[in-house]
Image (cartoon, grey):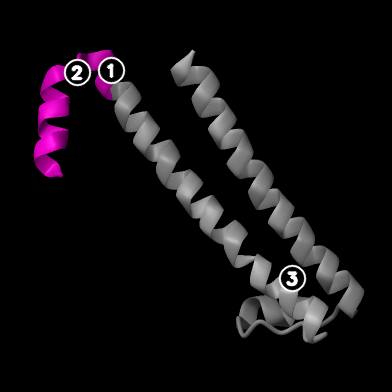
Amino acid sequence: MLDIIKILLLILNKKQKLVFFIALIIIFFSLVLETFGIGMILPIINVLVTGNRNINIDLIDKYIASFTLKEAFFIYLIIFFIFFFLYSLLFLYFFIHFIF
């Protein structure tokens, strides 16, 4: 794998290398956002099925404990859509800026 990257860096000019590294950074951030987005599905399902607002993360549990079940569901849903929206914006930026 590292050999392929070394060969690729030898072939690319300076501008293409910059675009390559920016693309790697954007892909890493999109990976993190997608992971958080997928991770938010379980708390949403947990609230819907069991009615339990706790997800065993102390910081979040302390904050969510003051809300009703319906409010907690909407908070998890809003967080999920925020991650999905940021993820979509990141890919849209990448495709518009680097592909076209």
What residue appears at the point 90 percent right and 73 percent down from the top-left corner?
70
Label 2: which residue?
A: 12
Image: 58 above or below 5: below
Q: Residue at x 46, y 50 (%)?
A: 31
Badge nearest the viewer, 1 or 3: 3
Stretch in magenta? 1-17
Nearest to the observer: residue 90 or residue 7 = 7
Query: What kind of element bears circle 3?
Result: helix
The circle on residue 68 is: none
Above or below, 51 relative to 31: below
Tags 3 and 2 touching, CB below 8 Å: no
Q: Position of residue 9 (x, y in %)?
A: 16, 26
Amino acid type at mark 3: Ile
Please give left or right for residue 50 compared with residue 40 in the image. right
- Spot occupied by residue 96 in the image (x, y as percentages of width and height): 54, 19
> Is there CB contact under 8 Å for labels 1 and 2?
yes
Picture residue at 15% right of the left edge, 44% below the top: 1
Residue 50 highlighted magenta (yes or no): no
Which mark identifies residue 44?
A: 3
**Within 10 angstroms of label 2, few (less than 14), some, or many (20 or more) residues?**
few
* C-alpha separation, residue under disc 1 versus residue under disc 2: 6 Å
**Dot 3: within a 10 Å radius of its alpha carbon, few (fewer than 14), some, or many (20 or more) residues?**
many
Q: Identity of the amino acid at label 1? A: Gln
Instruction: Residue type at mark 2: give it.
Output: Leu
Q: In the rendered image, which residue does mark 1 sit on?
A: 16
> Which badge, 1 or 3, comes first in the chain's sequence?
1
Q: Chief secondary structure of the magenta span?
A: helix
Give the image quarter of residue 86: top right
Q: Is residue 92 left or right of residue 4?
A: right
Q: CA distance from mark 1 to mark 3?
A: 42 Å
Residue positioned 28% across, 17% down in the render: 16
